[in-house]
């Protein structure tokens, strides 16, 4: 992909996308499918696309569909399991797969043929209370057609077949349980993002500006946005005027939202969290594990700490990771500045940030303990999931940055969010995506909602409605309420994306 562009003194695209990650790629592709004559400028501070949160080595979750992530199914005080968030995420992932299927069928781009692979999704717990929780979770989830086919077992021999490395060397007296969902996938969002940008680059009216840092965002009197940026290599200025701006810069979105100074963005803060992985370097070990195995976060730990022993396909090679191990940094991006956090503090968000900090002392304690971990501590955490793990088979890798959302709250003063949040101006002329997980996996649903919010007249038109249905056949329907439609769509997406056959909805 060409990583340079010759900036004119002033450009007037219809749309400016800031950040060359999965969100901008998804929005750009959808807008060009909805209105092919739309002109788009994409501004990225690095020299390649998908180099931050969308990169496979930086992305903490690949293919979030709520099949195995226990933090999406919290236990209520009465002991029952709340599956509402899991259903929403699973449905959103089906929407994403439909859009990816549409692209794969319509375009011949290498990256779009290999970005997704079949990998079973499994949950694993130990201890009597956790076994009972997983049993109840399975019973609740399999009442939804989105989760039918999920298997549960508390029999060590069966679990041994699913995840041999997890069971070998484990105390046979320890109560254990697991679920397995054969429909799970692994998604390389870096490859997918680059594939979509390759398509966008081939379309008329699309211009890329790599190595450009956005310095200013200002609304002109004619309501268009003036985006000022600087080439990070040559210091040459770039100025763009656009009717709509999307800020999809991952951890860098908050400072850019603050530059826009829209009232809707006031009071938002960010809490940066760094990540690390243990990467397996022994091919024999990697070959014996084929699953994404998610556990339960320790009591008092934040949702981001959910441990997983994770098979991934990265650049055509099978990999095995364990983590994540968290840490604290003041950077908002992996290739950002240590001044990112202090520079983001404003009079309007100081109180929410302080109140959120006070109310999240356990998170601070958790991060301090994570930073202080020794190699032996990290190995001990791995051995809880893989008792026979050897230190020589693993090496530490640095993952990407997450910036959790802090926002005003009338009751609490400020609250820390662990999801994603779209912030947009009242007139829909600018929007920003803040936050992290499940992020990339639900990008298509997020962008559909954003388009309907920011382009309300066009979004409601018969032409755009028809194109939405072409890109996403279930558009306007809830798959959780329509099992037959769900089965039809899963069969089709699995065939086109090269995934294994869809199991029957009754689980037989």
Image (spheres, rainbow, N blue to C red):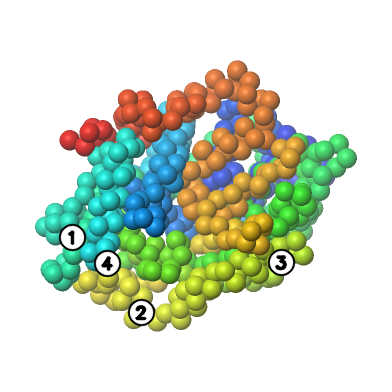
Pair 3/2: label in front: 3
Q: Which residue is mark 3?
A: 350
- In whole angstroms, how far apart are the C-alphas of marks 4 and 3? 40 Å
Q: Residue at x 71, y 66 (%)?
A: 350
Give coordinates of residue 89: x percent, y percent: 44, 44
Q: Which residue is mark 2?
A: 377
Mark-to-mark CA distance, 3 and 1: 49 Å
Q: What residue is shown at x 57% (from left), y 55% (from top)?
A: 435
Q: Which mark is residue 164?
A: 1
**Residue lying furthest front in this view?**
78
User: From the viewer's perspective, is residue 226 above or below residue 234?
Assistant: above
Kindly state the secondary structure of the residue where label 4 is placed. loop
Up the image or down, 441 lies above or below 61; here it is above
The mark lying in front, picked from 4 and 3, is: 3
Of mark 3 and mark 1, the one earlier in the sequence is 1
The percent coordinates of residue 64 (x first, y second) are 41, 48
Badge 2 crowding class, 10 Å Cα cut-off, few under 14, some 14 to 19, many 20 or more, is: few
Q: Which mark is residue 385?
A: 4
Which is more N-terminal, label 1 or label 2? Answer: 1
Q: Is residue 501 left or right of residue 454?
A: left
Q: How far apart are labels 3 and 2 at the CA level?
A: 35 Å
Q: Nearer the viewer, residue 12 or 360?
A: 360
As rendered, which of 409 and 316 lies closer to the eye? 409
Examine the rendered structure and indicate whether residue 75 appears above or below residue 206.
below
Element carrying mark 1:
helix
Q: Earlier in the sequence, mark 4 or mark 1?
A: 1
């Amino acid at each position: 992909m060409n990583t340079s562009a010759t900036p004119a003194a002033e450009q007037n695209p219809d749309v400016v996308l800031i950040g060359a990650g999965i969100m901008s790629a998804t929005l750009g592709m959808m807008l060009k499918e909805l209105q092919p004559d739309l002109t788009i400028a994409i501004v990225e501070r690095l020299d390649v696309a998908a180099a931050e949160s969308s990169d496979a080595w930086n992305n903490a979750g690949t293919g979030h569909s709520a099949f195995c992530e226990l933090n999406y199914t919290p236990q209520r005080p009465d002991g029952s399991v709340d599956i509402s968030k899991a259903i929403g995420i699973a449905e959103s992932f089906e929407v994403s797969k439909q859009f990816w299927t549409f692209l794969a069928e319509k375009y011949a781009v290498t990256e779009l043929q290999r970005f997704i692979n079949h990998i079973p999704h499994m949950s694993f717990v130990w201890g009597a209370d956790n076994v009972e929780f997983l049993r109840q979770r399975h019973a609740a989830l399999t009442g939804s057609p989105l989760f039918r086919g999920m298997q549960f077992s508390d029999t060590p021999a069966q679990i041994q077949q699913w995840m041999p490395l997890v069971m070998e060397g484990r105390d046979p007296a320890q109560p254990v349980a697991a679920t397995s969902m054969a429909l799970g996938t692994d998604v390389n969002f870096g490859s997918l993002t680059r594939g979509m940008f390759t398509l966008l680059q081939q379309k008329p009216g699309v211009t890329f500006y790599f190595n450009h840092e956005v310095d200013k965002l200002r609304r002109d009197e004619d309501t268009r946005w003036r985006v000022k940026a600087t080439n990070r290599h040559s210091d040459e200025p770039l100025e763009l005027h656009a009717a709509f701006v999307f800020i999809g810069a991952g951890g860098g979105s908050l400072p850019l939202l603050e530059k826009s100074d829209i009232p809707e963005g006031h009071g938002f803060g960010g809490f940066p969290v760094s990540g690390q992985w243990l990467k397996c370097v022994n091919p024999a070990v990697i070959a014996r594990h084929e699953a994404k195995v998610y556990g339960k976060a320790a009591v008092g730990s934040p949702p981001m700490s959910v441990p997983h022993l994770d098979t991934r396909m990265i650049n055509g090679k099978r990999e095995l990771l364990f983590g994540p191990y968290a840490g604290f940094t003041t950077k908002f991006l992996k290739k950002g500045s240590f001044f990112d956090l202090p520079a983001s503090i404003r009079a309007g968000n100081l109180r929410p940030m302080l109140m959120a900090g006070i109310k999240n002392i356990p998170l601070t304690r958790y991060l301090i303990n994570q930073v202080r971990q020794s190699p032996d501590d990290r190995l001990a955490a791995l051995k809880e999931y893989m008792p026979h793990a050897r230190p020589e088979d693993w090496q530490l890798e640095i993952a990407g940055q997450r910036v959790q959302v802090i926002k005003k709250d009338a009751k609490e003063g400020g609250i820390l969010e662990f999801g994603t949040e779209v912030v947009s101006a009242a007139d829909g002329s600018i929007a920003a995506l803040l936050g992290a997980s499940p992020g990339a996996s639900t990008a298509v649903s997020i962008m559909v909602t954003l388009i309907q919010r920011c382009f309300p007249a066009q979004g409601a038109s018969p032409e755009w409605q028809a194109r939405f249905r072409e890109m996403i056949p279930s558009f306007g329907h809830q798959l959780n309420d329509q099992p037959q439609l769900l089965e039809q769509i899963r069969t089709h997406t699995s065939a086109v994306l090269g995934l294994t056959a869809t199991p029957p909805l009754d689980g037989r």
